[in-house]
Each structure stands twice: as structure tokens, then as C-alpha cells.
Amino acid sequence: MENLVEIHKKCKIIFEKELIQPEDGRSFACKMWDVMTDKKDNHENCLGENFNQLIQTINDDFFENYTPSQNTKLDFYFTTYILWLYLIVERIDFVFDVVNKDNKSKLFADFKENNFKTSQLIKKWANFIKHPKEFIFSHWPQYIMEGSEIMNESETVIINANFVKKHYTKSDSRINELENCDSVIVLVPELTNLTTEFCKELNIFFDFICDNKIVSDFLRKKTTIEYYYEPNDSTTIDEKSSR
């Protein structure tokens, strides 16, 4: 079984390869900026920039500037990583809510349901972390990696992907089996695979916006400022965004 140091290295490679352009260090979120500004240097688009900044933050501060040690607890690492990915998922969901208000377009609704399964699983795990319900009534729950051997499995409540999908939605349903339970295991999903699938879905999202002129034109009105930079303004986008 791989340790967290090895898993972190693999996830870092996947994240950078799938989301960062090697030639200039821009993330693939910048494709939205390009489309909705027509690549004009004096225009600004906050949608592409905001997604880009979040991707760069995860890439720089979680992957580049942080390395788990042999003593890093699995629950800390998993919680931290999931919540950062969840910030992106919430933004994806918001954009879909804007372009498809009240899910009136079945075409868009079906597209989202069929192409963002890992993103929605991340959201369920984040709900578990934020709103644990009766999990807080369990005694000394353990966190182990998917694929690990589970002792006394028949007597253990296992919190895995199916469990969080069932119990950690918007529903207020109670989870009675967790109450006063002293045999609970949180089965952390295989993180390299989760990272790979998440990155694929994020690129699908970018293409959904960039390849659909109706969608990009609709969002352009909400997110693009024309002639944001003066013709002789030497201030870079990064400098201006840091003000």
C-alpha cells in the first residue's frame, strides 16, 4: 500500500500535467479568458481568471509548497485536499445554475449529470466533512485507504463512496447506525484516480464553455470588461489582480 508521500507526488504530477500548460504556465482555465476577451490584451475576463487563480493556488501551495510527512494523518490530508477540490466543484455548479436556471434545459442538465460524476462525489465527501451528522456520535473512527484490509468487516460501519452518496446529500435523514458506534471506518477513495477523473471533468467544463458560442457569449456579458487596461498601461494582469 502506497504511503501519503508517494500518493502526493503522483497526484501532483497528474494535476500539473492535466491542468497547467507546459509552455507558459497558464492553466487551461485561461482558455475561457481567451474566448471571452477575443485574446485582446486590453480586455479582462474574471471567470477565466478566477478559475485560473484557484487552480494555481492548489498547484503552488498544496502540491509545490507542501509535502506530507510519514507522520501526516490521513484524515488531515484527505480533508484538506477534498475541500480545496470542492471549491472548484462549487464554482462549476454555480456556472451551470446560471446558464441553466432551474434546470429548464434537459440537454444541459443531462450533460452535467453524465459528465461530472467525480465532481459530484467530491461534493458528497465535502458534505460529509462539513456536515458530519451522526458521525460525531461515533467512537474513535479510523481513516484508511481504499484497498486496505478491514478486520471484522461485517461488524464495522464503512463510510465509503456509496455511503456518502446515500447519506450526505441535501437530505436531513438520520444515520442511526453511527450513533454510539465504536467500529467505524472512513474508506478514503484512491486519490490518484480521483485526481485524474477530476482533472478530466474540469477540462470538459472549460470546453463546454469555450466550444459553445451561445454559452460563452452569455457568460461574456457577465464576466468581461472591455478596454479594462489602458493602451499604455504597462501593469500586468497578475499585478492588477493582486491589488
Image (tube, helix red, strand yellow):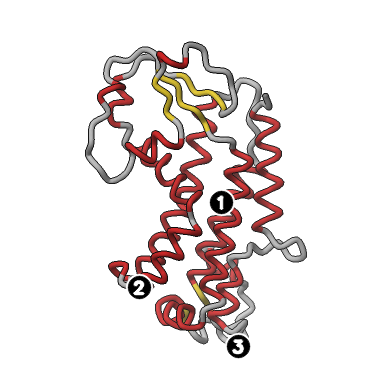
| Crowd rating for badge 1 (residues with CA inside 10 Å; few <14, some 14–19, many 20+) | many
158 in relation to 19, above or below: above
**Looking at this view, is 220 or 1 the one in front?**
1
Identify which residue is drawn at 42% across, 19% down: 141
- List the residue tagged with mark 2: 105
User: Amino acid type of disc 1?
Assistant: Phe
Percent position of residue 181, x then y: 32, 15
User: Amino acid type of disc 3?
Assistant: Pro
142 in relation to 202, above or below: above
- List the residue tagged with mark 3: 231
- List the residue tagged with mark 1: 198
Identify which residue is drawn at 62% across, 72% down: 236
Q: CA distance from mark 2 to mark 1?
A: 24 Å
Q: CA distance from mark 3 to mark 2?
A: 41 Å
**SS at circle 1:** helix
**SS at circle 2:** loop
Q: Quadrant of residue 39?
A: bottom right
- Which image quadrant: the N terminus? top right
- Marks 2 and 1 close (CB-CB < 8 Å): no
Left or right, residue 216 beside residue 239: left
Percent position of residue 124, x then y: 40, 43
User: Amino acid type of disc 2?
Assistant: Ser
